[in-house]
Amino acid sequence: MKIAVCGAAGRMGQAILAVVKADDGLTVSGAFDVDGNFAIVGGTPKIAPVKDLENSLSETDVLIDFTNPQSALENAQTASKHKIPIVIGATGFSAEQKEELAQISQIIPIVLSPNMSVGVNLLFKLVEETAKKVSGYDIEIVELHHNKKKDAPSGTAAKLAECAARGKGKNIDDVGVYGRHGIIGERKKDEIGVMAVRAGDIVGDHTVYFAGTGERIELTHRAHSRDAFAAGAVRAAKWIVGKPSGLYDMQDVLGLK
């Protein structure tokens, strides 16, 4: 299977290239980033400018994208011209951009997930199920990431909030509270708080608190490295080849739905 990687110069891109190279059944058909550079990444092709992506798609089975929302959207459009499936791990998409991806997914299969790790996707499931069972408990989410991360809250934290709200039969747009400051009054009954910490080189920690009277439940996932995310992205790439067009997520890839 031939895999092309967009965002190849970034932390996740480098981790994905390492996973692909370690798998005898996979080949890197292209490595792309914004401007490209001439560094050789452990024997893989040099990282080329993303504008050259279209030229390589005739030799590609699947595209993995860890760039940013606008770039990922443009790369998905390019992939759709060649009927190449795409796995997208970028976060921070607007509602309009998500709708555009949904339209593109009518042409090609797309896996879109804010987090590709097996553990986090199990956490999504656990949070929704727990929220169904603990009526009256306050729900708060705290996420920690490195000081270079550009979006807040993380896509994973936002997804956890959606799962918790769904478990409570609520819409996160109606109950989500993102950070608190000043005299804000008492906590509203149905609030789901989401707090972001940015410090050092933290890969990614997420904790969901269910706090009741006299007790609390904490569900936590800690990423020790980016290897789990990279392995999940490659697993999704293997899974999506040959699938019908549509918008999928890691719950589909892992058979958790």
Image (cartoon, rainbow, N blue to C red):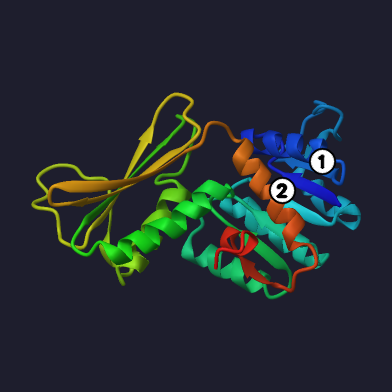
**Residue at (57% x, 61% y) in the render:** 251
User: Residue 4 location, x and y as percent?
Assistant: 79, 48
State if disc 2 and disc 1 touch (CB < 8 Å).
yes
Quadrant in the picture for residue 246: bottom right
| Residue appearing at x 87%, y 29% in the figure | 43
Regarding residue 26, the answer to whether it shows in the image is: yes
SS for dot 2? helix
From the viewer's perspective, tell me whether residue 173 is left or right of residue 215.
right
Residue depth check, mark 1 versus mark 2: number of the one nearer the observer = 1
20 in relation to 80, above or below: above
* Residue receiving disc 1: 23
Q: Position of residue 76 (x, y in %)?
A: 70, 60
Q: Where is residue 63 in the image (x, y as percent from the top left)?
A: 76, 53
Locate the C terminus by quadrant.
bottom right
Amino acid carrying label 2: it is: Val
Tell me where residue 194 appears, x and y as whole percent.
31, 49
Disc number for residue 1: none
Residue shown at 18% from the left, 47% from the top: 215
As measured in the structure, the alpha-carbon distance from the residue carrying label 1 to the one carrying label 2 is 10 Å
- Say above or below: 77 vs 90: below
Q: How crowded is mark 2: few (under 14 residues within 10 Å), some or many (20 or more)?
A: many
The image quadrant of residue 177 is bottom left
Q: Nearer the viewer, residue 68 or 248?
A: 248
Apparent side of residue 192 relative to residue 79 in the rendered image (left or right)? left
Horizontal side of residue 232 vs 37, given as left or right: left
Determine which of the numbered discs, if any, sits on residue 234 in the image: 2
Q: From this viewpoint, is residue 162 visible? A: no
Among numbered discs 1 and 2, the one appearing first in the sequence: 1
Point out the residue furthest to the right here: 59
